Amino acid sequence: MDDLKYGIRDKRGNWAPSEPLEVAPFWSGKFNQIGQWLVAYVWPHNTIFMLVTLAYWYFILPDWTKMKELTWDWSLWLYAVNAAGIFVMYGSVEFFYYFKRIQGTRFKYNPNFPSDKPSDVFWFKSQNIDNFLRSFLISIPIWTLIEVFTLWCFANGYAHWVDPKDHWLWLAVLIFLVPAIHEVHFYCGHWLIHQGPLYKWIHSIHHNSINPSPWSSMSMHPVEAAIFFSEMLWHLLLPSAPFVAMFQLTSTAYGAIVGHIGFDKLELTDERAMNSHAYTHYMHHKYFEVNYGADGVVPLDKWFGTWHDGTKQADERMKERFRRKKERLNRRKASSTPAE
């Protein structure tokens, strides 16, 4: 495919889509686009995450009587399944598009591949090894701990488990709102760990991957991983059901790759490609202080002035915001310096 039909490439080889990013059309008043948006909302990503959830529900989760007890056997079983699932999903994209490089740099935002640029900021000077180990030794175990705790709470009646037969409409609405819950939770937690020492000691580990790849998705400090996966716990507070809680968690865990694919489209054939929806979060990795949330289902970035849609106008707004921030820091520094 010719990626220049869909975007532009600068002198350094960086590719960007021609069309600016947009928040959900019901926020921008583009009601004629709601149908198209709904299709993209459901397909393909959320459909994939729902299928993963169904696989967990029918084939993976132990019996509820077993989950009333916190034991190593079913906890380690869930860790093994989680690790295997991520290895297959993330690893497939990594293998074909980063190792085999089957579409070269077509639709790739940053033309460089992480494996070609060793760096001292990573374990073993390798972004891929560092990101892989952090995912499997830190993030996936924490994901599993939260998953086990939540299921244990449901099994023991410590959650408001509503009956699907009596409350099917509410649960259907809640399932539909799972991405919105994710966006609010992710924005708040993500913005928090960008502040002061929290960024330095926690979130900077994730941002070492300026040019992210699939294994970067879960490369996190333990505190960040706990905040990230804790959105499943909302379903212990809301009137909900364990299936909905599992959908919340699987769409978070397996969906983390969406913002870190590094390609705008993944070519499936010579004429067909799947949109990645990765550009919003790629802009965050590129500029750090924009797009703390996701795709604008709940456009908190837009409302709080941190939205970057990829246009030159957004660049200018961002630079002006950075300039004002620098001035505030300089004034604060000057006022704290004792006069001679």
Image: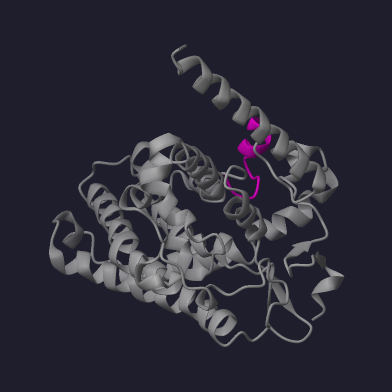
Image quadrant where one finds the N terminus? bottom right
Please give the range of residues in magenta. Answer: 293-305
The answer to which of 162 and 278 lies nearer the viewer is 278
Left or right: residue 269 compared with residue 18 = left
Whether 297 is drawn above or below 94: the answer is above
- Magenta: main secondary structure equals loop
Residue 264 is situated, as x and y percent measured from the top left of the image, at 69, 67
Look at the image and tell me whether residue 162 can be seen.
Answer: no
Quadrant in the rendering for residue 31 = top right
Give me the residue at 50% from left, 42% from top: 170
Whether 137 is drawn above or below 198: the answer is below
Residue 9 is situated, as x and y percent measured from the top left of the image, at 79, 67
The answer to which of 132 and 143 lies nearer the viewer is 132
Give me the residue at 65% from left, 45% from top: 296
Give me the residue at 57% from left, 20% from top: 331
Whether 275 is drawn above or below 173: the answer is below
